[in-house]
Image (tube, rainbow, N blue to C red):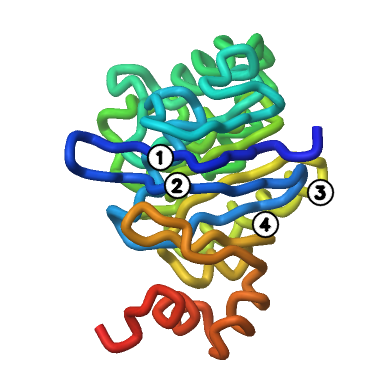
Amino acid sequence: MEYVIETQGLSKSFGSLQAVREVSLRVEPGETYGLLGPNGSGKTTLMRMLVGLVRPTRGTGGVLGEEIPPDRVLSRIGYMTQAGALYQELTVGENVAFFGALSGVTSKERIQEVIALVGLEDRAKSTVGTLSGGLKQRASLACALVHNPQLLILDEPTVGVDPQLRSIFWDHFRKLNQQGVTILVSSHVMDEAARCTRLGLMREGSLLAEGSPGELKSQAGTGDLEGAFLKIAGGSHA
């Protein structure tokens, strides 16, 4: 498998709104590919198409060697939504155990391991409905990681997470890359974007440019990613 994710002209319209416009990208095994752009740029819709939650209007795409929707390989994908998809009346531990069981994971040790990774050991028995937004983000990430997926698709995973824990998350993402796990992550935070192997800059549904953080800064002739994004997007004087 040369590419873990590959799309060609992938597009999605909702009535007159064109949310994703002719996106063609390739994500290689073992890298972290970051989708960088403001809210409403099409990042979430693109991810939802890749996991089969939204049908493309046109274009093609493949995930882990399967055409989208990738039903046969869903057990090898960890998907964390931006809004969260946890059961509010269940505890953190029960949620992680439930999502693990969907992919055949029943090890109590593994469940405890991912709960510890996201720093929720002392809230494992708390019902999700009682948690703050940031703590719910941590629980969602644990659910996405519990079954050791080959591909992680993370939609703004660190929203509401404190800087120290965010750094721990990204250190773990780097370790997963070293183990061969591929990560597609969306963000509009520039210091997170700098941690990605490669970036795709999105605006108004279009993929404007791709490359490593260094390549994009060089292309734009700027010393920072924010300046590179503004220049490439044509918004430096907005």
Amino acid found under the numbered disc labelled 4 = Asp
x and y percent of residue 113 in the render? 66, 32
Where is the N terminus found, in terms of image quarters? top right
In contact (CB < 8 Å): disc 2 and disc 4: no
Residue 29 shown left or right of residue 162 in the figure:
right
In contact (CB < 8 Å): disc 3 and disc 2: no
Amino acid found under the numbered disc labelled 1 = Ser
Q: Which residue is mark 3?
A: 178
As helix, strand or loop, the secondary structure at mark 2 comes to: strand
Say if 201 sits above or below 140 in the image. below
Q: Earlier in the sequence, mark 2 or mark 4?
A: 2
Q: Earlier in the sequence, mark 3 or mark 2?
A: 2
Query: Which is more foreground, mark 2 or mark 4?
Result: 2
As helix, strand or loop, the secondary structure at mark 4 comes to: helix
Can the viewer see residue 187 in this picture? yes
In contact (CB < 8 Å): disc 1 and disc 2: yes
Q: Which residue is mark 1?
A: 11
Say if 15 sits above or below 69 in the image. below
Tell me the quarter of the picture where residue 237 sits: bottom left
Q: Quote the CA–CA distance across marks 1 and 3.
A: 32 Å
Task: Please tell me which residue is depicted at 59% across the width and 52% down the height of the picture.
Answer: 169
